[in-house]
């Protein structure tokens, strides 16, 4: 089996690169859960969700768009591709300036609206300063992905985590919530600097002097639709968490939801990172985008490999990590969020086809419908809790997928022959089996036996046939 210069190597390196930031936030959140009270951790969780709204949406949109620009130009930074990337940066900074103006116009009202009064001015200033740093990180990451420079990208993300984890532990122990937020800021500054160094290392011969704002096709067809699409989804998690924090015992419930959803944030980044490897590969093959199994299998396998060990072992290690909550509560949250994430892993394949075919409006309508469905299910919930919030997320994902599949098929964005292929059905069946066992089994031996069997059943055919190499 050839590993060097293979899809598997590229996917693994890009996975490491793109997941480091989420793992850092994951570590900060879990360490704070030990050091702080559940109410304090709930307040920090609202802030972290807010970071993903204001900063994460722009980062994700600009990374995918820059990747598309460089993929089309075969990794060459010519005048057109540089101009396209400059378009992305200018538009992202313009959006940031608008957010700053709206937030700082009445900062006290902004604090109350954005964090339910749990943050202070200094924390809001740090939040706003994270955005331009993440814009820089996002566009450089997209360029390096498009240039297939995954080793440099992995180094640019691993080094800050290794260097700054001890510092963040000290700051959290010393200053609590504000120490955690300081750690996030220092991490973003360091990551941006190292990304710049890696960009220079990869593009030493770059000689570009004309700063044009031409070649805005990707900005119009990928960045803006992806930005609008993300604005229907990510803010919903922040808004619902804020609502949850305002209920009786709400900060503790927000803490439970955030602790479970931290895994979701990591998996979401895993899916995005795999997409960064898949899109250039799809552009280089003669198979139509929607009929290429390579578009779906890596993200669905990643969801399986990432989620199944967690849910099958959560009932046991959850007693130590999540001992402030009832086991039934965190198991129900984990199972429902896991099912929603698995659906997202499949839908990400459709999203990549939409991006490559330039049909972003369909993604916008689909995610707008998801938002309406989510808010509807949320309103129908008698008592808002971490469990009911997780249930609303899952129901919204199921509803939007079922109702929009005919639309996707009509516009040649999904192939039922691929969707119901033996490989995808096998992964889905094994995934559902793991959910059932995790929900009903109290035996660690049984759960780990099931885990071993499921991994063997799912992974052996792919490595035997070398489908992902």
Image: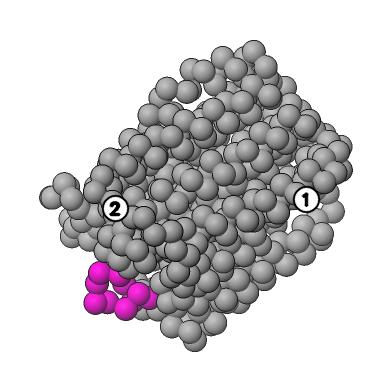
**In the rendered image, is residue 315 in sight?**
yes
Which circle's residue, 1 or 2, is located before the other in the chain? 1
Closer to the observer: label 1 or label 2?
Answer: 2
Q: Which mark is residue 379?
A: none
Q: Which residues are magenta?
A: 283-293
Residue 27 on image: x %, y %: 53, 29
Q: Is residue 292 magenta?
A: yes
Seen in the picture, residue 43 relative to 132 is either above or below; the reply is above
Between residues 129 and 373, which one lies in front from this camera angle? 129
Badge 1: residue crowd in 10 Å (few <14, some 14–19, many ≥20)? few
Q: Could you say whether the residue bearing mark 1 is in a helix, strand or loop?
A: helix
Q: Is residue 295 left or right of residue 165?
A: left
| Residue count near mark 2 (Cα–Cα under 10 Å), binned few <14, some 14–19, many ≥20 | few
Q: Residue 193's spot in the image, x, y percent?
A: 43, 34
Q: Quadrant of residue 79?
A: bottom left
On screen, residue 300 versus residue 35, left or right, reads: left
Residue 450 makes an appearance in the image: no
Q: Which residue is mark 2?
A: 207
**Secondary structure type for disc 2:** loop
Q: CA distance from mark 1 to mark 2?
A: 38 Å
Q: Position of residue 414 (x, y in %)?
A: 43, 77
Q: Nearer the viewer, residue 7 or 110?
A: 110
| Relative image position of residue 405 (x, y in whole percent) | 53, 77
Front position in the image: 134 or 89:
89
Residue at the far bottom in the pictured view: 410
- The residue carrying mark 1 is 102
x 78%, y 43%: residue? 104
Q: Are marks 1 and 2 in contact (CB under 8 Å)?
A: no
Q: Residue at x 73, y 29 (%)?
A: 122
């Amino acid at each position: 089996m050839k590993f060097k210069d293979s899809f598997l190597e590229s996917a693994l390196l890009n996975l490491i690169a793109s997941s480091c930031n989420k793992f850092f936030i994951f570590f900060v959140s879990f360490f704070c859960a030990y050091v702080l009270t559940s109410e304090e951790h709930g307040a920090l969780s609202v802030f972290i969700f807010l970071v993903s709204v204001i900063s994460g949406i722009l980062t994700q949109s600009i990374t995918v768009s820059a990747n598309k620009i460089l993929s089309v130009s075969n990794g060459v930074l010519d005048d057109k591709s540089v101009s396209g990337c400059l378009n992305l940066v200018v538009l992202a900074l313009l959006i940031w300036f608008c957010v700053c103006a709206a937030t700082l116009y009445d900062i006290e009202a902004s604090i109350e609206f954005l964090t339910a009064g749990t943050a202070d001015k200094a924390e809001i200033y740090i939040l706003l300063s994270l955005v331009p740093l993440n814009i820089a990180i996002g566009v450089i990451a997209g360029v390096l992905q498009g240039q297939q420079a995954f080793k440099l990208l992995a180094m640019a993300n691993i080094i800050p985590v290794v260097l700054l984890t001890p510092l963040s532990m000290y700051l959290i122990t010393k200053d609590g919530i504000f120490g955690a937020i300081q750690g996030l800021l220092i991490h973003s500054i360091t990551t941006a600097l190292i990304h710049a160094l890696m960009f220079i290392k990869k593009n030493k011969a770059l000689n570009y002097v004309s700063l044009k704002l031409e070649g805005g096709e990707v900005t119009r067809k990928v960045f803006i639709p992806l930005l609008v699409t993300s604005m229907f989804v990510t803010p919903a998690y922040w808004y619902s968490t804020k609502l949850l924090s305002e209920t009786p015992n709400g900060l503790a419930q927000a803490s439970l939801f955030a602790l479970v959803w931290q895994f979701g944030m990591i998996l979401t980044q895993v899916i995005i990172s795999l997409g960064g490897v898949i899109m250039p590969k799809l552009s280089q093959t003669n198979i139509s985008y929607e009929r290429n199994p390579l578009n779906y299998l890596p993200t669905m396998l990643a969801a399986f490999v990432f989620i199944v060990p967690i849910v099958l072992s959560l009932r046991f290690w959850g007693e130590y990590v999540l001992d402030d909550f009832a086991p039934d509560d965190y198991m129900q949250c984990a199972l429902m969020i896991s099912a929603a994430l698995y659906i997202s892993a499949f839908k990400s394949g459709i999203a990549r086809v939409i991006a490559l075919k330039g049909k972003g409006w369909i993604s916008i309508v689909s995610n707008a419908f998801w938002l309406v469905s989510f808010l509807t299910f949320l309103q129908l919930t008698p008592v808002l809790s971490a469990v009911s919030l997780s249930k609303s997320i899952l129901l919204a994902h199921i509803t939007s997928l079922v109702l929009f599949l005919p639309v996707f098929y009509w516009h040649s964005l999904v192939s039922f022959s691929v969707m119901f292929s033996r490989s995808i059905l096998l992964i889905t069946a094994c995934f559902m089996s793991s959910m059932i066992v995790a929900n009903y089994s109290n035996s660690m031996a049984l759960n780990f036996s099931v885990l071993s069997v499921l991994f063997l059943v799912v992974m052996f055919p792919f490595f035997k046939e070398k489908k992902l190499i």
